[in-house]
Amino acid sequence: MATAEQQQIEHVHLPVRGLTLHVAQAGKGELGTVIWYSWRHQMLAVAAAGYRAVAPDWRGYGLSDQPPEPEAAAYDDLIEDLLAILDALAVPKAFLVGKDFGAMPAYDFALRHPNRTCGVMCLGIPLGTAGLSFDTLPEGFYILRWAQPGRAEADFGKYDVKRVVRTIYILFSRSEIPIAKENQEIMDLADLSTPLPEWFSEEDLDVYSSLYENSGFRYPLQMPYRSLHQRKPIGDAKFQVPVFIVMGEKDYVFKFPGIESAMKDGTMEKHAPNIKITYIPEGGHFVQEQFPDYVNELLLGFLKDHPVLGTVVFLHGFPEIWYSWRHQMLAVAAAGYRAVAPDWRGYGLSDQPPEPEAAEYDDLVEDLLAILDALAVPKAFLVGKDFGAMPAYSFALCHPNRTCGVMCLGIPFGVNSSSLNTLPEGFYILRWAQPGRAGADFGKYDIRRVVRTIYILFSRNEIPIAKEDQEIMDLADLSTPLPEWFSEEDLDVYSSLYEKSGFRYPLQMPYRSMHQNKPIGDAKFQVPVFVVMGEKDYVFNIPGIESVMKDGSMEKHAPDLKITYIPEGSHFVQEQFPEFVNELLLSFLKDHPMAV
């Protein structure tokens, strides 16, 4: 393999179901994750396009461990190993690209684990071939010969490993099915005078030979040739993911009984509603090595046609909880995304920190990172609201490789917090920053009344400011109606969750800890940023907010910035105008497809 290729492909060894399996990988992108060396051309192509490419050696192959009992090989090992590899690499969902017998576990994995599969592309093997009969072929057919214990071992044993690999590559590159006569073995069908295919170099042969020197042929003959009969027929199963089959018209497999008919009689479409089939006129069995550029083009086209939509993480503010994102979660989930809305620590159904008064702003950013790791989410869109916007911005600046984009409601970035000091001492943020003041104020009422009052006050256009002889809770009474878009049932949900959490931590974070949020300085966002502001949001009237949104200063930090104003929008714009906010959000996601 060329030095440039060696430098671009990383090799790791993963503990998988009691064995150490070798995995080659390339690319750090998160567009998605797709015997390793045979995929060298495709790995580099998908990595260059922004994907993470992963190509394992199956157990017993290449640099992976041998199973303790090769003759006890079970077909399901392949599927279980694949699942374990994804888990070990923290890959929640992947595109599968299979070739030869590797296509079979790719199909079966997609049927068994559709929630872990983005799509399947297979070369040389159509789906629905389990139970395919070779009874019409002569006994010298290589699959029948190699299924006989000891027969291939004796045949291969007459030659060195390099000669065996060379012969197999020559035979499998032809259009004719490898069939030996009664007085021949399969290795007799080519000799050293037969040239290698022009697209397969001596250097390539050296790599394959060295890897089979390591593994030997004991397990590779067991799997597939003596184990694939364990594979169950497809039955009535249907693929829930897109399927793409590529067949070289000069691939000897195309001449197997039943293969061409399976490809062309429409039966595959019954199992795969979203199927595409492409034929390569001059393509042989190793089409991905024979025509790498064309196969790369087909593969990248398939990936592009089926983009990975990814994960959207919603970050609430105060007095909110996960429930404030209920409308947006359902909308993005219906569009094919994964919606995640945590309750911050100390809020809703999450645990209270052991020392609420020791709350630190950086806890929010670190918790968000830990949530992504715990959910095996490599990269996500962040949607923040109220104080939840601030850690969304900070996370995107600190962890751009884990962020697809940021959309925030009601809070722009880059606001000078000192501007709050120009407001009267009765300004709610200044009041609630005083230890004990809000606790005493809230303590005069039940939790439902407190949440009700805050929702009413924060839904208005005026900044909540109490007079010297008032507390914030005095600014509305029970005669004041709830906003028309906020029902008594909604209030029930919020109240029940604040009954659980109380207000001890929610007053500490944000009101007594957000000053720890460092100024943006010269930082620049490497991801798209979308800021949505309701023009009747009281926050819009806080000194410094309107100017930072309209004076161009945000554009200096976010080259890819979009700002949208909602004329009648209040502070809770995602609950007030859910359909419009959903439309804005889905458009933002669509305009910035995930880079999975």
Image (cartoon, rainbow, N blue to C red):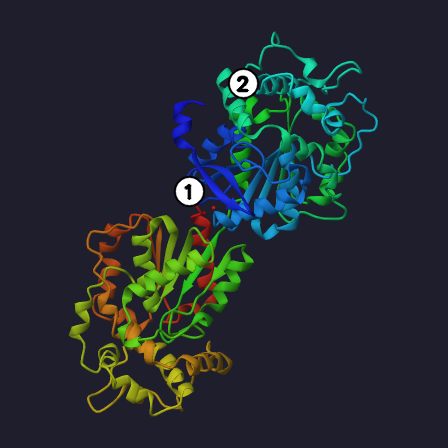
Q: Is residue 338 left or right of residue 98?
A: left
From this viewpoint, is residue 224 visible? Answer: yes
Could you say where residue 40 lies in the image, as x and y percent from the top left?
49, 29
Q: Which callout, 2 or 1, points at the residue further toward the start of the chain?
A: 1
Q: Is residue 52 above or below residue 6?
A: below
Q: Is residue 334 left or right of residue 321?
A: right
Q: Is residue 412 above or below residue 378?
A: below
Foreground: 112 or 309?
A: 112
Could you say where residue 228 lies in the image, as x and y percent from the top left?
71, 37
Q: Which residue is mark 1?
A: 29
Q: Is residue 233 above or below residue 552?
A: above
Residue at the location (53% across, 59% down)? 333
Could you say where residue 274 lies in the image, as x and y percent from the top left?
65, 43
Q: Could you tell me the amino acid type at mark 2?
A: Phe
Foreground: 157 or 302?
A: 157
Q: Is residue 317 left or right of residue 119?
A: left
